[in-house]
Image (spheres, rainbow, N blue to C red):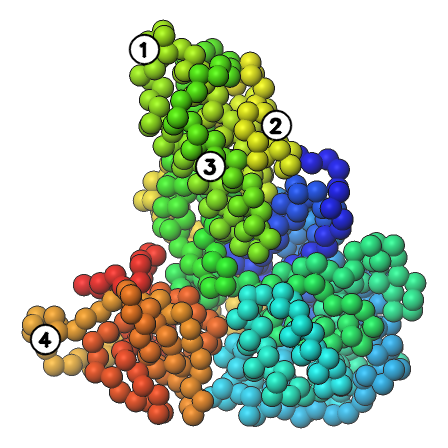
Amino acid sequence: MCTKCNKGKYYMTTAIAYTSGKPHIGNTYEVVLADSIARFKRQEGYDVYFQTGTDEHGQKIQEKAEKLGKTPKEFVDQVAGEVKRIWDMMNSSYDGFVRTTDEDHERQVTKIFKKLYDQGDIYKGAYEGMYCTPCESFWTESQLVDGKCPDCGREVTPAKEEAYFFKMSKYADRLIEHINSHPEFIQPVSRKNEMMNNFLLPGLQDLCVSRTSFDWGVVVDFDPKHVVYVWLDALSNYITKIGYDAGGNSTELFYKNWPADLHLIGKDIIRFHTIYWPIFLMALDLPLPKQIFGHPWLLQGGEKMSKSKGNVIYADDMVELFGVDATRYFVLHEMPFDNDGIITWELVVERLNSDLANILGNLVNRTVSMCNKYFGGVVSKTGAEEAVDKELKETATAARDKVKAKMDELRVADAISEVFTVLRRSNKYIDETEPWVLAKEESQKERLSEVLYNLTESITIAASLLSSFLPETAEKIVAQLGTVIRDFDNLNQFGLYESGNKVTEQPEILFARLDVKEIMEKVEAIREAQRAEFEEEQRAMGEAPQQEDDTAIDIEPKEEISYDDFMKMQFQVGEVIACEAVAKSKKLLCSQVRVGSQVKQIVSGIRKYYSPEEMVGKKVMVLVNLKPAKLAGVLSEGMLLCAEDENGALALVVPEKNMPAGAEIC
């Protein structure tokens, strides 16, 4: 491991976790993703400062605390402690953990608000509109979708109150110019297009930055009946924690690290980070962060996780069943770059068995065992090379630069796949060289030693590259091989494993194969405990426990059809590669769906339940031979299959497992 930072600073942050409740695995994914990037940057030689934390103010938190009979501070102290416990459990190597209830943060938010007010960027007025408490967002009537919040689809309530406003339009043109001249600023590109087309180019409205209808927030010192609106408060954490002072006395840590090199956030809060936050920074005369990456969501079987649905997966439950590094591996490897990822308990078992137990664990175990069996654990380079060795060596030495290229683009899943290419090639090398056959002939002893040396060296390189993603496992591997994590600069060289080293006498099983039936029995017990906990929480807040969403319902039966009638319909798996709202309709989305080698345009009345960006990347079930028709003037060449409950709510029908676009549904 590189012990000297030689590439300069690298300041990165996660979004701060909202303390309304325990974070699920989808929330936890973000800190694991950030940790893998931070570790990799340190391995490259950067002086990394990695910050995370909790967002603790707002109306939603105040209301929930009151229902539970707690003060807001008591409530957030408990939840923030739980967040930090989970972040630590996942072996995240953050350097700073900020809480927005920290005194130094609150003091600076007060000073920032006053500074912006004094220079004329904030003015006093009154607000009348629709308010979404879960999103902490105001909306005009025209922005609502079917009368509900356009972000989360929940109910909104009329709100009218005195408020302070920030002059967003004053800086809009400057922000547009910055985005256009810095193509790396918002990633992935789909997020940039969404912000430009949906918010910036149509024109920005002034932003409400204070509230008077609740008091759980940072008080505006010159007008104490107001508290600072949660987004101005929360976003400022990225500078307050590292020592920014609005009065001009910022710390050395701030001047060293700002601007941030990366803000890593969920796609649902991209607007606040790419529009509000840059404009606040412009008003403070501070440089903008270099990059804001809006990662996709991790969905449980294709749905957002919700306690009321009973489909929440928590990191500590996964760790109890699979271990920390296995959990890290799944969320890092299974999340696409810019499309939502899918998690199910069955899929986790399948992936861990195939990748961690078979490809990685079995390789290490076989190699160490053969070194012990044939040479008493001693690994020696003899020079007895053959042509088959060349491809293995080339694969191993090329991996470092391939991994680096993927990490530079924040394509973490692809970076891990590059490491597993080395592991797969090593397994193939065993099949090609057949060490057990070489061991039968004394004349092949030097060749056998060279084969085992090549395997040991390849695994050492792979383990060193895995150390950012599976840090505990990487350390266990090199310990079994009698070596250490190798310096990053040397990972493109083959033959640095010291000849004559000894491997451990008893290889440790890194990942045991899992029985899906046994795991699912344990999962059912977890679900039962979660249901009981949720119902208890509902009762504590004076609310009747909600029924599960999968309650059986009956519908009016249709006329029977014959098997021949059914066979006329062609159903296939499709992948949504692009999606946009239909301009003339509030209900329709127009999706471009890849089915095999074809792309079909399909119009669906699901806009109330899915945003265009949510649709992209989804695997869906498609009726492909439906006669084309025009809906709202747009041609539709098929139909997406959906389920509908008794209230008319829709959910896409998606494959349980990852299937290729074009697979027949039969």
SS of the residue under disc 1: loop
**CB under 8 Å between callouts 3 and 1?**
no
Question: Disc 3 marks which residue?
Answer: 395
Q: Which residue is drawn at 82% across and 54% down?
A: 256
- Up-down: is 665 above or below 490? below
Q: Earlier in the sequence, mark 2 or mark 3?
A: 3
Query: Which residue is denoted by mark 1 in the rendering?
Result: 440
Is residue 330 or residue 555 the one in the foreground?
Answer: 330
Q: Which mark is residue 545?
A: none
Three-letter amino acid code at the position of disc 2: Val
**Which of the two discs, 3 and 1, sits closer to the camera?**
3
Which residue, given by chain and number where applicable, does mark 4 sit on?
565
Relative height, residue 319 to residue 335 (above, below)? above
User: What's under tag 1, amino acid-wise?
Assistant: Lys
Find numbered disc 4 in the image and state the secondary structure of the residue it sits on: helix
| Residue linked to disc 2 | 484
